[in-house]
Image: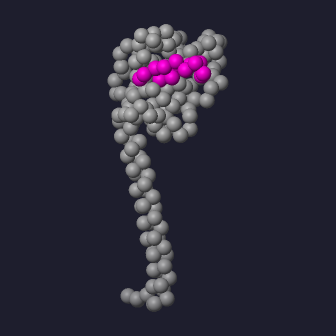
Amino acid sequence: MRFLSMSAATRFARPMLLLAIVGSFVVSLAGCGGAADGRIAAERKRLVLAEEPSGATSIAEARKNLILQPEVTLVGTIGAADQETFQPGAASFVLSEAPAKGHSHAGHDADTCPFCRHRAKETPLALVQLVDEQGEVLKTDAPTLLGLEAGQVVVVKGRGKWNDKLELLVVKAGSIHIRK
């Protein structure tokens, strides 16, 4: 067995030392991300309801009863025609009325269906803001926080308020159920 010469040992040690330095830097970065991932996981656990809450209403129904009942449970579809769905850097999204029961079927495309396209132009909208326990909008966008996508049907629970300036219902939601 031959031993490495001094120059061979040095050539071998330099890349290993560099790898060790880079590795410790990557581990420290992962530690920072791990804290953020832990916070996101905790918020996800707090927000997401495994079971769908009872008494969900349409956006129009909730708006009509808002003065008497500011606590709302809404069912709707994430996204709306000609609207930005998600707000970057904030856990908020646009919610439109859910499709009429029995209307959609396998292979149904709401973008090409004349009934759905007409309904989308007239549909009431809500701005859903997922909030922390102090009522502040979470600073992580909804797709990152909960894996939400446009077109998903969700049920949200929270406190609704009509915004005259935006002309839509704003819901500060403390919980959400994502329909499968």
Residue 41, position in %: x, y?
A: 38, 41
Q: Quadrant of the C terminus?
A: top left
Q: Is residue 14 visible?
A: yes
Residue 14, position in %: x, y?
A: 48, 79
Nearest the eye: 52 or 107: 52
Q: Relative to residue 112, is residue 156 drawn left or right?
A: left
Residue 119, position in %: x, y?
A: 60, 12
The residue sitting at 40% across, 18% down in the picture is 71
Q: Quadrant of the N terminus?
A: bottom left
Q: Is residue 162 above or below residue 84?
A: above
Residue 81, position in %: x, y?
A: 63, 22
In magenta, the rendered stretch is 158-171
Q: Is residue 77 visible?
A: no
Q: Write down the quadrant of residue 83 in the picture.
A: top right
Q: Main secondary structure of the magenta part?
A: strand
The residue sitting at 56% across, 32% down in the picture is 86
Q: Is residue 5 above or below residue 98?
A: below
The residue sitting at 46% across, 37% down in the picture is 138
